[in-house]
């Protein structure tokens, strides 16, 4: 069944947020690279790639259910951060916000009796649990490391394979 226009518009809006998250993670990756933290930069580059995949899942779903796809304007991401801890803290806040938006979309789909959209969103409900857990853990590690960010580099190097899906 084709989503009604309110649901389609909400899906387009959220697709834009996933593209915004893609750009935000790219900006974070670039800032970390500039700080001389290549492994942590690479981790955020990987996060950026995941967000692009998320946005494309929305795009394809909107196409598959009849469209039209309307890609919203994306605000410029934050480019400067007070510290690595502030950066990871804002990444966690971003993931928590996206989780709330995904949950709102599920409630909207239910209100509109839109089972296809609700089923599509279930993957994102599970994905956000992992995203929030990952960023929570990284924030804890950064806090444990204190000023010794090379410990974070070492941690991320060993952590990446265990998180690979
Ligand atoms: Fe995402
Ligand atoms: Fe994410």
Image (spheres, helix red, strand yellow):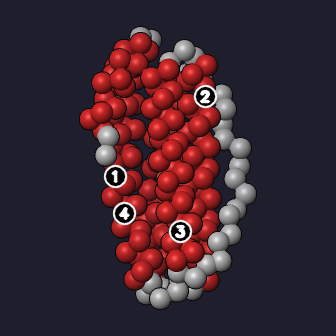
Quadrant for residue 33, please give it. top right
Nearer to us: label 3 or label 1: 3
Q: Residue at x 46, y 59 (%)?
A: 100
Query: Do callouts 1 and 2 mark residues in contact (Cβ within 8 Å)?
Result: no
In the picture of the structure, the residue carrying the numbered disc 4 is 123
Nearer the N terminus, badge 3 or badge 2? 2
Judge the density around disc 4: few (<14), some (14-19), many (≥20) Cα neighbours within 10 Å.
few
The percent coordinates of residue 6 (x first, y second) are 60, 80
Residue 148 horizontal side relative to residue 4, left or right: left
Q: 57 or 106: which is nearer to us?
A: 57
Residue 96 horizontal side relative to residue 13, left or right: left
Nearer the N terminus, badge 2 or badge 4? 2
The percent coordinates of residue 133 (x first, y second) are 33, 43
In the picture of the structure, the residue carrying the numbered disc 2 is 30
The secondary element bearing badge 3 is classed as helix
The percent coordinates of residue 12 (x first, y second) are 61, 68
Residue 148 horizontal side relative to residue 38, left or right: left
In the image, farthest residue toward the left: 162
Mark 2 vs mark 4, CA separation in Å: 29 Å
Nearer to us: label 3 or label 2: 3
In the picture of the structure, the residue carrying the numbered disc 1 is 129
Nearer the N terminus, badge 1 or badge 4? 4
Res. 116 visible in picture: yes
Q: Residue at x 59, y 56 (%)?
A: 17
């Amino acid at each position: 069944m084709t989503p009604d226009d309110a649901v389609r518009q909400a899906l387009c809006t959220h697709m834009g947020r996933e593209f915004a998250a893609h750009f935000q993670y790219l900006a974070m990756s670039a800032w970390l690279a500039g700080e001389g933290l290549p492994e942590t930069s690479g981790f955020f580059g990987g996060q950026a790639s995941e967000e692009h995949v998320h946005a494309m899942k929305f795009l394809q779903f909107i196409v598959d259910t009849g469209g039209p796809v309307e890609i919203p304007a994306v605000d410029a991401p934050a480019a400067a951060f007070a510290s690595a801890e502030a950066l990871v803290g804002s990444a966690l806040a971003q993931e928590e916000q996206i989780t709330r938006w995904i949950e709102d979309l599920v409630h909207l789909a239910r209100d509109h009796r839109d089972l296809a959209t609700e089923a599509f969103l279930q993957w994102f409900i599970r994905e956000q649990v992992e995203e929030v857990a990952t960023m929570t853990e990284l924030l804890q590690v950064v806090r444990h490391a204190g000023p010794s960010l090379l410990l974070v580099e070492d941690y991320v190097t060993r952590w990446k394979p265990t998180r690979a899906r």
